[in-house]
Image (cartoon, rainbow, N blue to C red):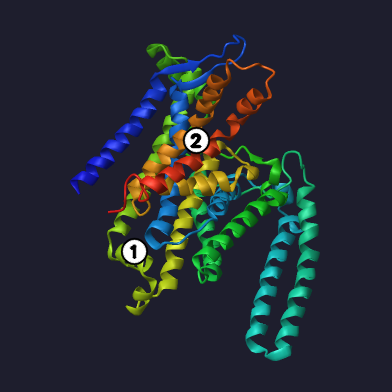
């Protein structure tokens, strides 16, 4: 136990040292061409460090959600990007003010009728399936679904056209409820949990590899809907001006505050840089509080009888089922909890960025990278997931600059017109993907249980 604790402290201290060096040391490599920009190895900027730390904290929350599903229960879900995106959607639907011009019978009113019609058609089809038999069941259910689809579209399409025609350059959507941004965080968790329940009721009965394929497809469907349904979140036109959570102010409001300006003058600070750092610090405090709360809850769950039961199901489903445990029910339970944590992180990310960009939700960033954090840190170990999130996101940020500097060093004496030099310097953009893949292979080969293995 002592060795494990010492290992944890040492690795977190080394991670902290990396961030400290990033904030205090400025190291830049300059090409032979004096007119070309240099390649930054270490930025020497606390703004950059805080930017990295904020994303590390959010990534750590997502990693804890994935660790809950995989490390506790052995559920291999590849639809993380969908749950994070739903959390982001909650930031729009909860925090943005409503677009009052479309909240009438022809707009949102007709949209609600269409959605209720769709639910009614599905319910009627389920009722018919349970009460009819033979060919009557087949033809009856088919007729209900086909007829109901056309009825639904007849109500839904005009409502959508009406909403999207309303000031499409600035709105074209229904807006939100105008509630505080902090309310969007649990709302994001609830939306992701509801989607996980619907997915889990059908997909958790599948074999593990089929579950991975199903969740990957469903995650991409969620992102595709967000990209194309402008009435919901403006689609690829992006929803902007999402309010910040209390008590985080804007940089401009700080720069206009005489009290803040006096503080900067007394300490010899640049008000512009100081306002940015102050805002980043407030975000860091909020995100750290949420991370610690979730980490505390996950640790309690892991060491409780429930946690021991989940690990027993993970290690041997057959034996656990023979002991009277409802394996499918427990899988659904932990699947929903993990998705809810990812959804909350997605809502936090959107309220921090102030905008929702559906095209930014890619499996590489919000599925593969989060999985890599859990694997590198140590699946089944909550502290390992946090460490893996900090390390991988730090490398994700720095590898591009380091790769560019390495490619420059390797090609600085080549002919500028050389095709090989052009190819090598142009490949710096791919260094992130390459390095992440190499890290995964090295960890799986030499430390398959991660940097902080499960106890």
Label 1, on which residue? 311
The quarter of the image holding the C terminus is bottom left
Q: Which mark is residue 329?
A: none
Q: Position of residue 229 (x, y in %)?
A: 71, 52
Q: Nearer the viewer, residue 211 or 403?
A: 403
Label 2, on which residue? 396
Q: Position of residue 366 (x, y in %)?
A: 54, 46
Q: Nearer the viewer, residue 433 or 78?
A: 433
Residue 38: quarter of image? top right
Q: Nearer the viewer, residue 409 or 146?
A: 409
Q: CA distance from mark 2 to mark 1?
A: 31 Å
Q: Which residue ends up furthest to the left in the rendered image?
A: 2
Residue 389: quarter of image? top left
The relative height of residue 420 versus residue 436 in the rendered view (above or below) is: above
Q: Is residue 133 visible?
A: yes
Q: Nearer the viewer, residue 415 or 305?
A: 415
Mark 2 crowd level (few <14, some 14–19, many ≥20, 10 Å Cα): some
Whichever of labels 2 and 1 marks the residue nearer the N terminus, that label is: 1
Q: Is residue 257 visible?
A: no
Name the side, left or right, on which 28 lies relative to 18.
right
Mark 1 crowd level (few <14, some 14–19, many ≥20, 10 Å Cα): many
Q: Residue at x 61, y 17 (%)?
A: 414
The relative height of residue 115 versus residue 268 in the rendered view (above or below) is: below
Q: Position of residue 401 (x, y in %)?
A: 52, 26
Q: Position of residue 394 (x, y in %)?
A: 45, 34
Q: Residue at x 41, y 11 (%)?
A: 268
Name the side, left or right, on which 73 lies relative to 299.
right
The secondary element bearing badge 2 is classed as helix
The secondary element bearing badge 1 is classed as helix
Q: Residue at x 36, y 68 (%)?
A: 313
């Amino acid at each position: 136990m002592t060795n494990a604790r010492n290992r944890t402290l040492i690795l977190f201290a080394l991670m902290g040292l990396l961030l400290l060096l990033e904030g205090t040391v400025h190291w830049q490599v300059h090409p032979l061409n004096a007119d070309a920009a240099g390649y930054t190895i270490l930025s020497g900027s606390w703004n950059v460090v805080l930017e990295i730390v904020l994303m590390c904290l959010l990534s750590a929350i997502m990693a804890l959600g994935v660790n809950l599903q995989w490390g506790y229960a052995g559920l291999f879900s590849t639809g993380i990007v969908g749950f994070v995106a739903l959390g982001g959607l909650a930031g729009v639907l909860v925090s943005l003010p409503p677009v009052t011009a479309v909240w009438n019978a022809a707009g949102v009113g007709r949209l609600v009728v269409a959605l209720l019609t769709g639910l009614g058609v599905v319910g009627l089809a389920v009722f018919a399936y349970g009460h009819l038999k033979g060919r009557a069941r087949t033809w009856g259910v088919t007729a209900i679904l086909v007829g109901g689809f056309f009825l639904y579209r007849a109500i839904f399409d005009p409502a959508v056209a009406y909403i999207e025609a309303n000031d499409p350059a600035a709105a074209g959507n229904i807006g939100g409820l105008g509630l505080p941004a902090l309310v969007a965080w649990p709302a994001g968790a609830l939306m992701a949990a509801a989607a996980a329940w619907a997915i889990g009721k059908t997909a958790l009965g599948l074999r593990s590899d089929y579950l991975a394929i199903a969740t990957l497809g469903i995650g991409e469907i969620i992102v595709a809907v967000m990209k194309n349904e402008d009435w919901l979140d403006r689609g690829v036109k992006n929803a902007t001006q999402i309010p910040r959570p209390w008590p985080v102010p804007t940089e401009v409001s700080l720069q206009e505050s005489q009290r803040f300006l006096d503080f900067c003058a007394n300490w010899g600070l640049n008000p512009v840089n100081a306002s940015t750092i102050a805002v980043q610090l407030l975000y860091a405090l909020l995100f750290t509080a949420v991370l610690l709360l979730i980490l505390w809850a996950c640790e309690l769950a892991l060491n409780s009888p429930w946690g021991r039961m989940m690990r027993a199901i993970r290690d041997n489903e057959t034996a656990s089922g023979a002991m009277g445990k409802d394996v499918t029910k427990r899988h659904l339970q932990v699947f929903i909890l993990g998705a809810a944590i990812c959804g909350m992180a997605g809502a936090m990310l959107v309220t921090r960025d102030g905008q929702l960009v559906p095209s930014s939700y890619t499996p590489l960033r919000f599925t593969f990278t989060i999985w890599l954090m859990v694997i590198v840190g140590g699946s089944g170990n909550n502290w390992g997931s946090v460490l893996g999130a900090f390390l991988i996101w730090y490398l994700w940020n720095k590898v591009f600059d380091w790769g560019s500097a390495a490619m420059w060093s390797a090609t600085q004496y080549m002919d500028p017109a050389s095709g090989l030099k052009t190819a090598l310097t142009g490949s710096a953009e791919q260094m992130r993907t390459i390095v992440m893949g190499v890290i995964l292979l090295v960890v799986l080969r030499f430390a398959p249980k991660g940097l902080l293995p499960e106890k």
